[in-house]
Image: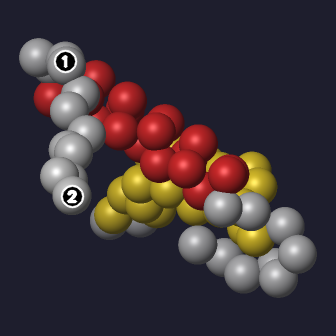
């Protein structure tokens, strides 16, 4: 079985990261998470994605 890689065809690194974050948001929604937030700025750091599970109320 061949493992296929995800390839994002974008030259700009910031846009590539944004596209990957949106892809991960869609993935987590399909796994039962809701309200994904991307690129959350906290003091001194940046969180790429945050989401809550629909039934278990777990924070990702």
Q: CA distance from mark 1 to mark 2?
A: 28 Å
User: How many residues crowd around disc 2 within 10 Å: few (fewer than 14), some, or many (20 or more)?
Assistant: few
Comparing 15 with 20, the one in front is 20
In the image, is 44 to the left or to the right of 57?
left
In the image, is 3 to the left or to the right of 53?
left
User: How many residues crowd around disc 1 within 10 Å: few (fewer than 14), some, or many (20 or more)?
Assistant: few
Q: Which mark is residue 1?
A: 2
What residue do we see at 11% from left, 17% from top? 11
What residue do we see at 82% from left, 79% from top? 57
If you read the primary sequence from the N terminus, does the residue marked by circle 1 or circle 2 appear first? Answer: 2
**Nearer the observer, disc 1 or disc 2?**
2
Residue 37, compared with residue 15, is above or below; it is: below
Residue 13, compared with residue 3, is above or below; it is: above
Q: Are marks 1 and 2 in contact (CB under 8 Å)?
A: no
Q: Which mark is residue 35?
A: none
State the image coordinates of residue 30 (x, y, percent, origin top left): 67, 52
Quarter of the image with the C terminus is: bottom right
State the image coordinates of residue 52 (x, y, percent, origin top left): 73, 67
Q: Secondary structure at mark 1?
A: loop
State the image coordinates of residue 44 (x, y, percent, origin top left): 32, 65
Q: Can residue 14 be spotted in the picture?
A: no
Give the residue at mark 1: 10
């Amino acid at each position: 079985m061949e493992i296929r890689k995800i390839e994002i065809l974008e030259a700009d690194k910031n846009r590539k990261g944004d596209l990957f974050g949106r892809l991960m948001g869609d993935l987590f929604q399909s796994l039962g998470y809701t309200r994904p937030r991307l690129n959350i700025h906290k003091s001194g750091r940046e969180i790429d994605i945050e989401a809550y599970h629909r039934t278990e109320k777990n924070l990702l």
